[in-house]
Image (spheres, rainbow, N blue to C red):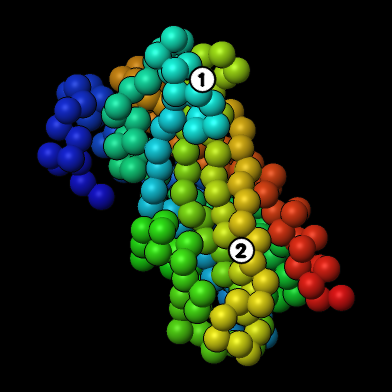
């Protein structure tokens, strides 16, 4: 990923910091899949990273007037910083550390497959058929749909990730679907010139991991009820 005219509005120091962040990649090395990529696996979990991020003052559930009465430190560059820094690789590694096979209650030996291509969230939301060309009868999808940061000076900032988990059998459409989100604190945005690049990536990666850990139990329980 290159830093070009898309981030020309950042200060010279901020551009240098973001370049350093991108060159570092993820601060945490990906753990072994533990044999999940074995060719003999009967089940498959396919994961797609999010391409969308937004920052919201106070969140969508509160009166818009609050944002005027209590203006927070809303930075219009946050969305662009996030998009430049948070790669699909970083998102995948965050989910891998949470052990999605066991976290979602999938059969042992399920093969983990990641996909680098992205699409608009509204397209993912409407999709019913499989997103990959796999024909496995034991097939799961995990869509990291989007990330958002609620900047709130009253109750504190909250970073959330929305997920869409689906189970397909021999049908052309999913037989189970669970949409939800996980959220926690994240204070690194907007990225400042004095911030340590490795620490910024570490905090973002751990926040995405924590969001999935919060989301996964409900999806696991729903899948378990379906398979009884």
Q: Residue at x 61, y 57 (%)?
A: 179
Task: Give yes or no for contact between labels 1 and 2 (Cβ–Cβ under 8 Å).
Answer: no
Name the residue beneath numbered marker 1.
Answer: 152
Q: x%, y% of residue 70? A: 46, 10
Instruction: Quadrant for residue 36, please give it.
Output: bottom right
Q: Residue at x 30, y 27 (%)?
A: 76
* Alpha-carbon span between mark 1 and mark 2: 29 Å
In the rendered image, the vertical position of residue 52 relative to residue 196, given as above or below: below
Tell me if 200 is positioned left or right of 35 in this view.
left
Q: Residue furthest right?
A: 228
Instruction: Quadrant for residue 194, please give it.
Output: top left
Tell me if 20 is positioned left or right of 171 in this view.
left
Q: x%, y% of residue 49? A: 45, 57
Can the viewer see residue 161?
yes
Tell me if 18 is positioned left or right of 180 in this view.
left
Name the residue beneath numbered marker 2.
Answer: 165
Nearest the eye: 113 or 180:
180
Marks counted in the figure total 2
Q: Residue at x 75, y 53 (%)?
A: 217
Task: Quarter of the image for the C terminus: give it.
Answer: bottom right
Disc on res. 198: none
Nearest the eye: 47 or 54:
54
Q: SS at mark 2? A: strand
Q: Residue at x 34, y 43 (%)?
A: 83
Q: SS at mark 1? A: loop
Nearest the eye: 192 or 136:
136
Number of residues whose C-alpha sits closer than 10 Å to that of mark 2, classed few (under 14), some (14–19) or many (20 or more): many
- Which mark sits nearer the N-terminus, 1 or 2? 1
Q: x%, y% of residue 105? A: 76, 65
Instruction: Quadrant for residue 156, please give it.
Output: top right
Number of residues whose C-alpha sits closer than 10 Å to that of mark 1, classed few (under 14), some (14–19) or many (20 or more): many
In the rendered image, the vertical position of residue 9 relative to residue 109, given as above or below: above
């Amino acid at each position: 990923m290159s830093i070009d005219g898309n981030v020309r509005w950042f200060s010279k120091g901020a551009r240098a910091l973001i370049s350093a962040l991108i060159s570092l990649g993820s601060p945490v090395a990906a753990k072994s899949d533990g044999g999940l990529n074995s060719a003999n696996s009967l089940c498959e979990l396919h994961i797609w990273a999010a391409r969308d991020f937004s920052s919201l003052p106070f969140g969508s559930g509160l009166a818009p007037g609050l944002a005027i009465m209590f203006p927070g430190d809303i930075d219009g560059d946050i969305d662009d910083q996030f998009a430049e820094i948070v790669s699909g690789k970083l998102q995948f590694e965050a989910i891998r550390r949470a052990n999605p096979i066991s976290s979602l209650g999938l059969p042992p030996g399920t093969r983990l497959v990641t996909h680098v291509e992205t699409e608009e969230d509204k397209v993912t939301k409407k999709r019913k058929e499989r997103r990959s060309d796999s024909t496995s009868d034991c097939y799961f999808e995990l869509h990291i749909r989007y990330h958002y940061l609620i900047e709130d000076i009253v109750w504190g900032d909250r970073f959330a990730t929305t997920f869409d988990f689906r189970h397909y059998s021999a049908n052309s459409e999913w037989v189970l679907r669970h949409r939800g989100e996980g959220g926690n604190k994240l204070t690194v945005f907007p990225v400042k010139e004095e911030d340590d690049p490795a620490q910024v990536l570490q905090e973002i990666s751990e926040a995405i991991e924590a969001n999935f850990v919060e989301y996964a139990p409900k999806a696991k329980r729903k899948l378990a009820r379906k398979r009884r």
